[in-house]
Image: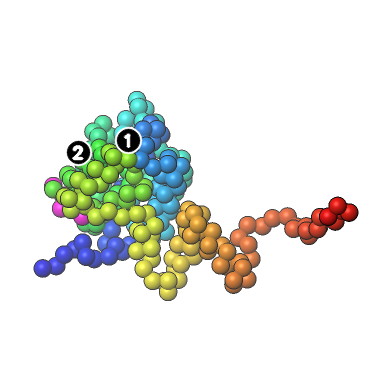
Amino acid sequence: MHDPKLEQLTPQNSQMIFIDHQPQMAFGVQSIDRQTLKNNTVALAKAAKLFAVPVTLTTVETDSFSGHTYPELLAVFPEHPLLERTSMNSWDDQKVRDSLAAAGRKKVVVSGLWTEVCNTTFALGAMLEGGYEIYMVADASGGTSAEAHQYAMDRMVQAGVVPVTWQQVLLEWQRDWARRETYDGVIGIAKEHSGAYGMGIDYAYTMVHGAPERVAHGPRQAAIPAAVTAAE
């Protein structure tokens, strides 16, 4: 029997939803460093834009509680509509269901806050009622404690959700380094957001392959050895 979860994610078979990346929601996150969370979320957004993957952006109680979506995330999709709602479960909102249906793709990559509430209820509803496959980006989501995040991930995995990481999604969409149309974009995202891996790319390009540094700077003045004193 064909198992669709054995299919790799591609830019053609998947879509993305970002759930409630708003400051009041982020303030409660304790399962991951919040700056790392934002870095990973923005990197994932840039990946979706690079590969032209359809994206749904949701917000909850913006003016009364949660505040405005990260400006760094909005900067990736400056013209994109924000689907405001009152329910903790995005799946309850008809606008969200319509957005997912319009994309016409059953594999839904999810990044959101909080893992144990908004992510879990959306995932269960989308699978049960919409027949979607859910790929939960664990390191671009956060819970109110490490336990809350982990138990929510466990519950979702038991229900059939596929756990992934943001960089895994990026590289699965790229799949082959011979795909030159997205190669430079993937490398650019990695350099900016992938920590030590990104540093390694810069090092390899400049020190091994002799590429110019990617940021211009002033002249490098030659080192001057320390003077040798009599005591030495």
Of all residues, the one furthest to the bottom in this rendering is 178
On the question of residue 74 being in view, the answer is no
Q: Amino acid at mark 2?
A: Asp
Residue 177 spot, x, y in % from top left: 42, 71
Q: Residue at the location (34% across, 44% down)?
A: 141
Residue 201: in magenta span = no
Dot 2 or dot 1, earlier in sequence: 2
Answer with left or right where residue 196 lies relative to residue 21.
right
Q: Quadrant of the N terminus?
A: bottom left
Q: Quadrant of the C terminus?
A: bottom right
- Circle 2 crowding by C-alpha within 10 Å: few under 14, some 14–19, many from 20: some
Q: Do the numbered discs 2 and 1 sit on residues whose CB atoms are within 8 Å?
A: no
- Circle 1 crowding by C-alpha within 10 Å: few under 14, some 14–19, many from 20: many
Circle 1 SS class: loop
Question: Residue under circle 2?
Answer: 92
Q: How is the image coloured?
A: rainbow
Residue 157 spot, x, y in % from top left: 21, 51
Q: Is residue 99 above or below residue 4?
A: above
Residue 10 spot, x, y in % from top left: 31, 64
Of all residues, the one furthest to the top in this rendering is 64
The span shown in magenta is 129-133
Observer-nearest of 199 and 50: 199
On the question of residue 214 being in view, the answer is yes
Q: In the drawing, what numbered circle is on residue 144?
A: 1
Circle 2 SS class: helix
Q: Amino acid at mark 1?
A: Thr
Residue 126 spot, x, y in % from top left: 19, 47
Q: Is residue 226 above or below residue 175?
A: above
Q: Residue at the location (40% across, 47% down)?
A: 41
Between marks 2 and 1 in the image, the one whose residue lies nearer the viewer = 1
Of all residues, the one furthest to the front in this rendering is 231
